[in-house]
Amino acid sequence: MEKSYSRGRPLHPEYHKLGFRRIKVEGKSSVVCDLCKCVLQNTATKRLRGHRNVCPQNANNVKKEDVSMDRGK
C-alpha cells in the first residue's frame, strides 16, 4: 500500500481499485491515472470514477451501479 502523507486524510481504497496513484504537484495532492498517465487535481472519488468512464485507455469501464452507489451519500 502507498505511504500516506503525514497530514490530511488517509488514502481512500478506491484509488487503487480504480487504478490511480497519489502524487504531490507543487505541494498539492493530485493523482495520476495508471492507464493514460493523466494528472488529475481533483481527487474526489466521484471525479476519479468519472475519469475512468471517459479514459481513452480504459477497455473495462466502471459499471454504472458502482457510480450510483455514492449518489445517496
Image (cartoon, rainbow, N blue to C red):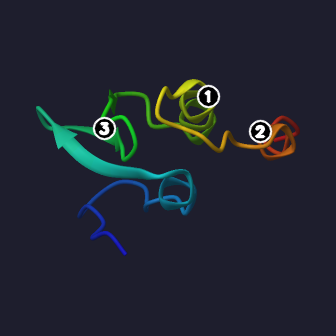
For the N terminus, give its image quadrant.
bottom left
The image quarter containing residue 35 is top left
Q: Is residue 49 left or right of residue 21?
A: right
What percent of the width, then of the height, locates residue 39? 30, 31
Identify the secondary structure beneath mark 3. strand
Side of 67 relative to 58 (left or right): right
**Image point (32%, 41%), residue name:** 32
User: Is label 1 or label 3 in front?
Assistant: 1
Q: Nearer the viewer, mark 3 or mark 2?
A: 2
Q: Which quadrant would residue 4 be assigned to in this image?
A: bottom left
Which residue carries the number 1 mark?
A: 50
Identify the secondary structure beneath mark 1: helix
Q: Amino acid at mark 3?
A: Ser
- Report the amino acid beneath label 2: Val
Residue reaching furthest to the left: 26
Mark 1 is on which residue type? Gly
The residue that mark 3 highlights is: 30
**Spot occupied by residue 18 in the image (x, y as percentages of width and height):** 55, 51
Q: Earlier in the sequence, mark 2 or mark 1?
A: 1
Residue at horizontal 43 percent and vertical 55 percent from the top: 9
Residue at the front extreme, as displayed: 59
Residue at the disc numbered 2: 67
Q: Residues within 10 Å of mark 2 (few under 14, many from 20)?
A: some
Crowding at label 1, few (<14), some or many (≥20) Cα neighbours within 10 Å? some
The residue carrying pointer 3 sits among few (fewer than 14), some (14 to 19) or many (20 or more) residues within 10 Å by Cα, namely some
Whether tag 2 and tag 1 are in contact, CB under 8 A, the answer is yes
Residue 31: x percent and y percent? 34, 41
Q: Earlier in the sequence, mark 1 or mark 3?
A: 3
- What residue do we see at 59% from left, 40% from top? 59
